[in-house]
Amino acid sequence: MAQACSNTEHSSRATAILRRVAAYTGVTLAAVGLVTAFAAAPAEAADIDYEAASASEIEDHLGDLETELDGANADLAGLQAQFDAAQAVIDAASAEYGTSDAQLSYVTAAVESADDELGAKVSTLVEYAQEQSDKYTEAQEAAELSAQLETQIDKTEAQVADLDAQIEEAQAAYDEAAEAEAEAEAAAAAEEEAAASTESSGGGDSSSSSTAEYSSDAATAAVQFAKDQLGESYVFGAAGPDTWDCSGLISGAYAVSDVSLTHSTWTMWDETSSIGRGDLQPGDLVFYNGQNHVAMYIGDGQVIHAPKPGDVVKISDLDMGMSIDGYRRV
């Protein structure tokens, strides 16, 4: 009884088929990848928690995925080359022996070319029959190999598609993490700068005594002017008469008393004098969020200010959730 071939024997026959098909396709043995009919599974990139990972860690993970994708694409190309080679064997056998017309033509030519002796003709036909049997066997083995390769190609294509999706997800996570880190660094730098400025001016010390003379008339007029603007819209860069931003409102309020303040929170800080929290009186200024925002103290723990786009001039608590940089007097 004939025994089933081993994996080694099957691999050897597949290799022999691929070698023979080189004459038909021009595919080199190196390109076909004769060591094995199937690609080795590439190493998978380690799992990562995008929410907890830093931009640098996500970038490294992204590199691993791209390397894995390159390997999968190379495997896919090798499998496709092997599949095409196996198909060439099948196509060649079909063209030479696969139709009755082809067989009849071949037999007729063989018989006519043989000697007139009957033995020679019979011998020629026997040789043709053996050759046809060999080609049939070769084509059958190539068909089996093609089916296995086609399955592997489908799996590798699915792997490539999955890696493409993972890379897209990783790239989006990296962009988000990098942006968040940049914003955090900018905020930390602004806070450090504000702290240094406050320390040098003494503006952040609530126990310091007032060193600036309080001008009751100008301060009272400024508070009243600001209250008259309650409900008017915030517009960035606006300084009246019907729309305001935070520093525009303050400079407009003091302008009624001919007190000139620059329409800029950072410059306004430099133009005013530091006081302690305990020295606050109506008309004094409170700076917030790295000197990016300014409000006017109106007493009773409240300030009036123009907050942000989409909002209006309104009264808020002195401690309204933003970090306070210091207290200043005009």
Image: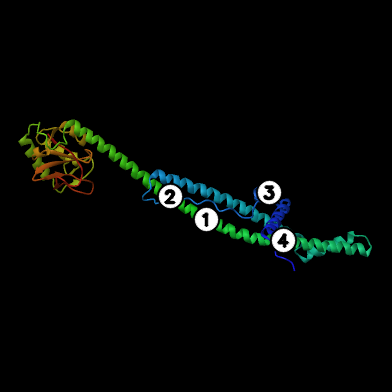
For marks 2 and 4, the one nearer the N-term is 4
Q: Work out whether 145 lies above or below 221.
A: below
Q: Quadrant of residue 286?
A: top left
For marks 1 and 2, the one nearer the N-term is 1
Asked if marks 4 and 3 touch (Cβ < 8 Å), the reply is no
Q: Residues within 10 Å of mark 3 (few under 14, many from 20)?
A: some
Q: Residues within 10 Å of mark 2 (few under 14, many from 20)?
A: many
Q: CA distance from mark 3 to mark 1?
A: 25 Å
Q: CA distance from mark 1 to mark 2?
A: 16 Å
The residue under label 4 is which amino acid type?
A: Ala
The residue under label 1 is which amino acid type?
A: Gln
Which residue sits at x=52%, y=49%?
68
Q: Quadrant of residue 201?
A: top left
Q: CA distance from mark 2 to mark 4?
A: 45 Å
Asked if marks 3 and 1 touch (Cβ < 8 Å), the reply is no
| Residue labelled with disc 2 | 170
Q: CA distance from mark 4 to mark 3?
A: 19 Å
Asked if marks 3 and 2 touch (Cβ < 8 Å), the reply is no
Q: Residues within 10 Å of mark 4 (few under 14, many from 20)?
A: many
- Residue lying farthest bottom? 1
| Residue labelled with disc 4 | 139
- The dot on residue 70 is none
The residue under label 3 is which amino acid type?
A: Leu
| Residue labelled with disc 3 | 29
Q: CA distance from mark 3 to mark 2?
A: 37 Å
SS at badge 1: helix
Q: Work out whether 199 lies above or below 319.
A: above
Which residue sits at x=43%, y=44%?
59
